[in-house]
Amino acid sequence: MTPKTLITSGTEAAIQQALSIDPNNGKANFYSAITKPLLTAKGFIPRLEPIADDNQSTELVRLNERISMTGLKELITFATELPEGKKPFDSYYDLQRALRTELLLALVESTKKLERISNGKPIPININLGRLGIKNNSGYNWTYSNSTSDYSEYSYCEKGSYTENKTTKSWEWNCTSTVKVQTYTYTQNNYPSYMNIDASDLKLLSSVTLGAVDYLRLMTAYSAKGLTAFTKRYKAMEERYHMRLPKFWAIELMKKYRDLGILESDHELAEVAHTGEEAMKHFLDLVAMKEQICSSNERWAKFPLFPNICVDERESKHFQIIADLLSGPKKVAIGLDINDELVKVLVDVPGFLSNPPKDIKAVLPELDYSENIISLPDPKWVDCFLKVT
């Protein structure tokens, strides 16, 4: 598999055809789990540009330049051309909804596909990261050398002017610019032309994907509608007063935006606990398998995707604590009282996620001028999460 096949919709169609013939096809499931989330990012540079601040715009320009220098037309097109039916984001809320309705859904499907093939035979795949000029940190290594003095010329897109009227907002992109790229030959040292995705690779990929799913569920649960206007106004106030504004000003300003921080009707917070617990269990399994998967010459010789999977045993304690908290109500020691008696609270993460606050603004603390917490406007939500025992 090359960068071209990783980022083209034609490949996804072929994968779906293979899955329609055999839903348990290991290679097709694996490729689909990787490509579907990637395809949701098509045209990410022009989509993100309207909501990027000055620093972010500079980073997008630099990224565009680096992508252009690869000389890979498919990658350049993927990054700079809007897919049919998509348009640039007008606000952070547009981005948030795209993450919820596009990327999150694709990642959830990926977790199912990875689970489907987790107990099967090793999956041989062909992939060439060298074409992307990506340094491989997985345990193999490769080098490249200049094989010719010739240069190849490629076209790329760069941002032009911004136009806005009553009905539309758009950026004009100039795709006639060219860049000369010197031709290189990549020589792979101990880097096979194929890899075998084994159960440990899949377990690591599953845990990371589950973690990404939960992260997106948390990031998209509460509405970002109004965040763009809030941010602009907040920055304008800082410029006006030539100072960093106190936090209580930010909280009071946030309350002026009714829709900002409202719980979305399609949120999936209730699923976060189960998904997170599954991710932690995968990590704990990798800890238990340390002797077989960490610095194992026998496994390395079979060319897995991740030759060395080494999870620190000290980290496993944190994974276990998180898994316990996500599994149900747990007593947690928080310190000593005035009589040196141990104080414990009952923490109910799943209960809180199943009945979250409807408006995040309602649970923001009230602060004084020194930014000390005075009170919580609506302390009832704490009872769903913490109880002193």
Image: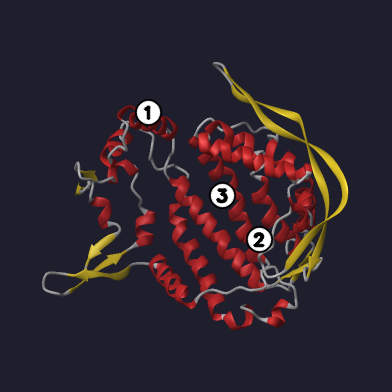
Residue visible at 56% across and 16% down in the picture: 165
Q: Amino acid at mark 3?
A: Leu
Real-space Cα distance between discs 3 and 1?
33 Å
Q: Is residue 85 above or below residue 364?
A: above
Please rate how many residues cluster around mark 2, counting C-alpha atoms within 10 Å: few if below 14, some from 14 to 19, many from 20: many
Q: Quadrant of residue 168?
A: top right
Looking at the rendered structure, the secondary structure element under dot 3 is helix
Task: Work out which quarter of the rendered image holds the N terminus and state it.
Answer: bottom right
Q: Is residue 92 left or right of residue 149?
A: left
- In the rendered image, residue 117, in percent from the top left (x then y), is placed at 68, 67
Structural crowding at the residue carrying mark 1, measured as other residues with C-alpha within 10 Å and reported as few (<14), some (14–19) or many (≥20) = few
Q: Work out whether mark 1 precedes mark 2 in sequence or the reverse, and give the earlier one.
A: 2
All told, the count of numbered labels is 3
The numbered disc on residue 113 is 2
* Amino acid type for the residue under numbered disc 1: Ala
Residue 23 image offset from top left, x and y in percent: 73, 61
Distance Cα–Cα, label 1 vs label 2: 47 Å
What residue do we see at 56% from left, 65% from top?
A: 207
Going by the picture, which residue comes out furthest to the top?
166
- Give the CA distance from mark 2 to mark 3: 14 Å
In the image, 152 versus 28, the foreground residue is 152
Compare marks 3 and 1 and give the one earlier in the sequence.
3
Q: Please report whichever mark, 2 or 3, sits nearer to the chain's N-terminal start.
A: 3
Q: Secondary structure at mark 2?
A: helix
Q: Is residue 342 above or below residue 82?
A: below
For residue 236, the mark is 1
Residue at coordinates 63% horizontally, 41% vertically from top-left?
62
Does 295 appear above or below 51? Answer: below
Query: In front: mark 1 or mark 2?
Result: 1
| Residue pointed to by mark 3 | 104
Dot 1 falls on a residue whose secondary structure is helix
Residue type at numbered disc 2: Lys
